[in-house]
Amino acid sequence: MTVVDPVTDERVGVCPSCGGHKQRRSELCRSCWRQKPKPRSSTRPRTGRQYAREHFPLAAVCERCQNAPAVDRHHINGNPLNNEPGNIASLCRRCHMEVDGRIRTVAT
């Protein structure tokens, strides 16, 4: 059922974008609202990991095993907000997981 607002002479409850049903106080229906581009704040604080990715280039090889190419930046003291150059290590994925305790090293 379409209701017409007597003041503005517009249909109430109809999305202006697609013509679908919308809630009374919303400007768009749910599907149009989800598709609408959201504003991104450039002043949003970056996490330590994002800062490390942007400011510390990876070494050619892993600093721990010296074999595989480095693909991760590891915060040595475990604090991702501590981005001192001495706290960032370039590691391969396997060494990074071993150092973080996500996989166990197999003794040979």
Image (cartoon, rainbow, N blue to C red):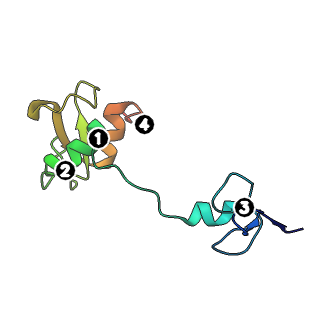
- Do the numbered discs 1 and 2 sit on residues whose CB atoms are within 8 Å? yes
The residue lying at 43 percent from left, 36 percent from top is: 103
- Residue at image mark 1: 46
Of marks 4 and 3, the one in the foreground: 3
Of marks 4 and 1, the one in the foreground: 1
The answer to whether residue 102 is above or below residue 53 is above
- Residue at image mark 2: 54
Name of the residue lying farthest toward the bottom: 18
Of marks 3 and 2, the one in the foreground: 3
Q: Where is residue 96 in the image (x, y as percent from the top left)?
A: 31, 40
Marks 3/2: CA–CA distance? 54 Å
Judge left or right: residue 102 versus residue 71.
right
The residue lying at 18 percent from left, 47 percent from top is: 62
- Residue at image mark 4: 103
The answer to whether residue 36 is above or below residue 17 is above
- Do the numbered discs 4 and 3 sit on residues whose CB atoms are within 8 Å? no
The amino acid sitting under disc 1 is Arg
Q: Position of residue 52 (x, y in %)?
A: 21, 42
Marks 4/3: CA–CA distance? 66 Å
Name of the residue lying farthest toward the right: 1
- Residue at image mark 3: 7
**Quarter placement of the C terminus:** top left
The kind of secondary structure element at disc 3 is loop
Q: Which of 47 and 106 is in front in this view?
A: 47
Judge left or right: residue 57 versus residue 14.
left
